[in-house]
Every structure is written in C-alpha cells, then in structure tokens.
Image (tube, grey):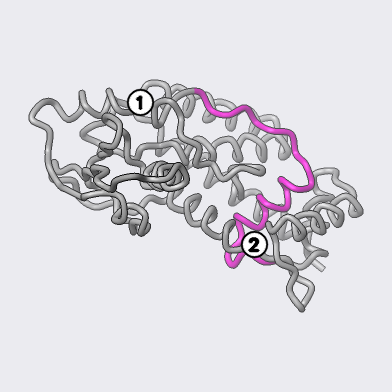
C-alpha cells in the first residue's frame, strides 16, 4: 500500500521527524492504483484486477481506466505487453523506501554516530538539493549547514551523491546522546502524531469502515517515512513506532483478504 499520492514523501521538514501526521487524503482512482501496486510484490497487476479494486471503493471502471492511461503518460506506470500495469523505476525506489520504513534494517548500536561533512566546493543548486534529499532518505539530521549525522544503527546503502560531496566520519558526542537526538529530531511531535494515527486506525477498524482504514493506513505510511529510526536508548519511553507498524500490518492483512475475495474469478 502506498503512503503518498503524487509526492515521493522525501520533502525535508524544518526539523526531521517532526510534527503531526499528514491528514488522510480522499480516495481517488490514482491513489487507489498506486496504493495497490506499491503494496504488491512484484508491483504489477492486470487492468481487470485494478478495476475490481477500484470498484471495492466505489470508483467506476471507466474512471480507473482513465487514471491508468494518465499514469502511463505521466511516467508513473508502464503498460506491459501482457496487459498488466507495473510501477516505473522511480516508483520502485519509493516502494523500497516504504518497505524500509515498515521493516527497518538495523544493527546493534554501540554508541557511534555517522557523520557526513560537506567538503565539495562550488556546488550547484541542483547538487545541493540532491544531497539534501539523499540525507533525508538516509534519515540523517543537519546539525548545522553542511554537517549531517545520526546514530550508526541503520543498514542501508548510500547513494553516490553523498561520497561525491561529503567526507564521511564516525564518532560519538561527548555529551548526552539522547539530548542530542532530542535536539535534532522532534521526537515528541512524531510520537504524538503516531499515537493519533493509532487511535484513528482503531476507530476505523471498530466502525468496519474499510475506506477510512485505507486512508488512515496511507497517512500512517507517510508518517513512518519520517520516523528517525533511532536506537531504543535514545527514544522517549513508550515510543509508538512499533504500535503504528503493527496497526498498519493488521490493516494490510485484512485488505489483502478482502481483495482476494473481491478479485477472485
């Protein structure tokens, strides 16, 4: 399932990990198609299946087919020779980020921090923008202009733009690392947003409102993309990240069961 509708979810907030979750967005044919394909592995499905998914949420067949054509023209989807629609490379990268936010690859933390210091000279605006986006995807925070860091507890590749513009170091703060983390990321704001989404997911499930659960789950994925994924030692007590992921996993399992019934021949 997709956490965004038309944006790649990597915009840099004023303070990483910050704030209230994005409000649930109304269901459209485009958002339903993207959500379905981004939640499917491999991300390719026949048009007839996507039409049936749209019908499940009250979207007419013609509306879904128009959306598919427009998404192909926009470069969001490829139409294969067998009639299936598949995500393009750009959206496959989004799917990978989404998967990582749901099931992050971590390692034991021994107190070390990743540090990246910009040392390239005369960078073009496009280069600076590319680095900032890469740092956001890597979940590094900017201590000051040109200096990025985070605890060294995540396992993920770095795009070439990082090595091209930065000198990479490993170190540890002399002061309290939890205090540094709290200064770099808005942990209280992210936690409040996550708890609100957990409550909204529970309410939608209790009401049996599948469409509402769908929109809340999409908002949850957008919020998980901003989770700094810090070591437990640096997080406030009762951190709601795991609870939010469990609510999303439960919704996805229920949705898959409904889709299997609805799309069966």
User: In the image, residue 208 lies at what x, y percent?
Assistant: 71, 35
Q: Say few, some or many: other residues with alpha carbon within 10 Å of mark 1 (under 14 / 14 to 19 / 20 or more).
A: many
Q: Residue at x 40, y 31 (%)?
A: 17
Q: Nearer the viewer, residue 16 or 106?
A: 16
> Picture coordinates of residue 112 (x, y %)?
15, 43
User: For residue 95, which quarter of the picture?
Assistant: bottom right
Q: Residue at x 46, y 34 (%)?
A: 12
Answer left or right for 179 relative to 93: left
Q: Position of residue 2 (x, y in %)?
A: 61, 48
Of 83 and 11, the residue lying toward us: 11
Quick check: marks 1 and 2 in contact, CB under 8 Å? no
Q: Residues within 10 Å of mark 2 (few under 14, many from 20)?
A: many
In the current view of this chain or complex, which residue is farthest to the bottom? 81
Mark identifier at residue 87 = 2
Classify 135 as above or below 79: above
Say the numbered circle drawn on residue 109.
Answer: none
The segment highlighted magenta reads: 20-45
Name the residue beneath numbered marker 1. Answer: 187
- Give me the residue at 40% from left, 39% from top: 242
Q: Nearer the viewer, residue 206 or 163?
A: 163
Work out whether 41 lies above or below 180. Answer: below
Say which element carries label 1: helix
Q: Is residue 10 left or right of residue 114?
A: right
State which quadrant residue 51 falls in.
bottom right
């Amino acid at each position: 399932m997709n956490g965004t509708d038309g944006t790649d979810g990597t915009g840099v907030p004023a303070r990483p990990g910050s704030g209230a979750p994005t409000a649930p967005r109304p269901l459209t044919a485009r958002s339903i198609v993207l959500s379905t394909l981004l939640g499917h592995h491999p991300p390719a499905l026949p048009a007839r299946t996507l039409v049936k998914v749209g019908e499940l949420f009250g979207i007419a067949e013609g509306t879904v087919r128009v959306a598919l054509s427009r998404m192909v023209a926009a470069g969001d989807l490829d139409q294969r020779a067998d009639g299936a629609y598949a995500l393009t490379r750009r959206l496959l990268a989004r799917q990978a980020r989404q998967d990582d936010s749901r099931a992050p690859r971590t390692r034991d933390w021994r107190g070390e921090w990743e540090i990246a210091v910009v040392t390239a000279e005369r960078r073009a605006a496009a280069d600076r923008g590319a680095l900032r986006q890469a740092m956001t995807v890597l979940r590094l925070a900017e201590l000051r202009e040109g200096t990025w860091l985070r605890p060294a507890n995540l396992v993920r590749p770095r795009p070439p733009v990082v090595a091209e513009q930065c000198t990479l170091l490993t170190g540890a703060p002399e002061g309290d690392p939890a205090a540094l983390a709290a200064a770099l990321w808005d942990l209280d704001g992210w936690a409040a947003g996550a708890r609100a989404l957990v409550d909204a997911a529970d309410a939608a499930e209790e009401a049996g409102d599948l469409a509402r659960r769908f929109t809340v789950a999409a908002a949850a994925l957008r919020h998980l993309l901003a989770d700094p994924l810090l070591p437990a030692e640096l997080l406030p007590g009762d951190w709601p990240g795991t609870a939010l992921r469990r609510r999303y996993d439960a919704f996805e399992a229920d949705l898959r069961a409904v889709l299997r019934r609805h799309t069966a021949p």
